[in-house]
Amino acid sequence: MSANTRSLENTMLKTRLKSMLRNSLPTLAMIALIPIWELVCWLFEVPEFILPRPSAIAEAFVAVEPQRWLLHLGATLYIALAGFALSILISLPLAVLLVRSEFLNKTLFPILVVIQSTPIIAIAPLLIVIMGTGDAPRLTITCLITFFPLVVSATTGMLSTPEELIELSRSLRGGAIREIWQIRLPYAIPHIFSGLKVGITLAVIGAVIAEFVAAEQGLGYFVQFSTSYFKIPQAFAALFFLSIVSLMLFKAVRWTQKIWFGWSLQKSS
């Protein structure tokens, strides 16, 4: 093996190790906080009902049957993903309308801002009264929390399409549908996925808020149930479980972008 080949392999190995270290830094930082947290709670004798130790949280997590975790996880995932899908179905056509019509842009967008500015937790009980205690109000709450970032990101992406591409399409007598489908939407993909990454985490928040108001299962309901009985370590265990679920959903959206729209990652980063 020549010296040049060994040098190239060493360079590639160092680059790979640096990349792995850089990607694992957030995880390593979180792991490093656990013994510090445990030590602080032990040294200052922090009461468990204020801040439980990580060891107590782990014990509480293991004490709950796996079937019970899966039951609550399934309920939360159903509301989060269904509400997220509903927000996509509403926000993308709405973004197209806002791009195509200046009148709708000026009239509808302020209304969307008002809806987004309204605290959802304040109107959640009203939605329960109007829609009942089924899945409809929980899906509505999740959709209301999720759809605004999707509308804004998709509209921004489509409006940022270079004007010369639009003029070229019109000079070739391309219709409005081709302009949206073949020019504006592909150019907006990085923006849309930025909104999707924000939206999927908000969908979990929306599902939890909905479960706080009216639900008999779900991780949000489990947190509320645990705190009402002062089982604080158990509530923290559910919160950490929710964080992991939210992180995995975020990663799933990023993997989808990488697999199907890998070219857009460079543009969005």
Image (cartoon, rainbow, N blue to C red):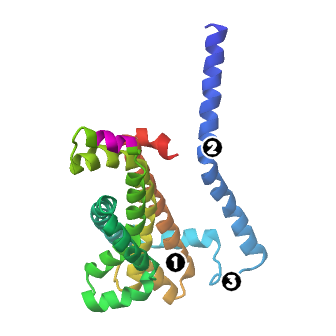
List the residue tagged with mark 3: 47
Q: Residue at x 38, y 77 (%)?
A: 111
Q: Is residue 22 left or right of residue 181?
A: right
- Magenta stretch: dominant SS? helix
Farthest residue to the top: give it. Answer: 2
Q: Which secondary structure lies at badge 1?
A: helix
Spot occupied by residue 164 in the image (x, y as percentages of width and height): 38, 41
Q: Is residue 204 left or right of residue 236?
A: left
Q: Residue at x 74, y 68 (%)?
A: 39
Q: Examine the rendered structure and indicate whether residue 58 appears above or below residue 249.
A: below
Spot occupied by residue 124 in the image (x, y as percentages of width and height): 38, 86
First reached walking from the N terminus: tag 1 or tag 2: 2
Q: Residue at x 44, y 82 (%)?
A: 118
- Alpha carbon separation for disc pair 1 and 3: 15 Å
- The answer to whether residue 73 shows anywhere in this view is no
- Amino acid at dot 3: Pro
First reached walking from the N terminus: tag 2 or tag 3: 2
Q: Is residue 103 left or right of residue 195?
A: left
Quarter containing the N terminus: top right
Q: Is residue 8 magenta?
A: no
- Amino acid at dot 2: Arg
List the residue tagged with mark 2: 22
List the residue tagged with mark 1: 235
Q: Examine the rendered structure and indicate whether residue 68 appears above or below residue 214.
A: above
Which residue occupies the foreground of this view, 77 or 58?
77
Disc 1 versus disc 2: nearer the observer:
2
Which residue occupies the foreground of this view, 104 or 85?
104
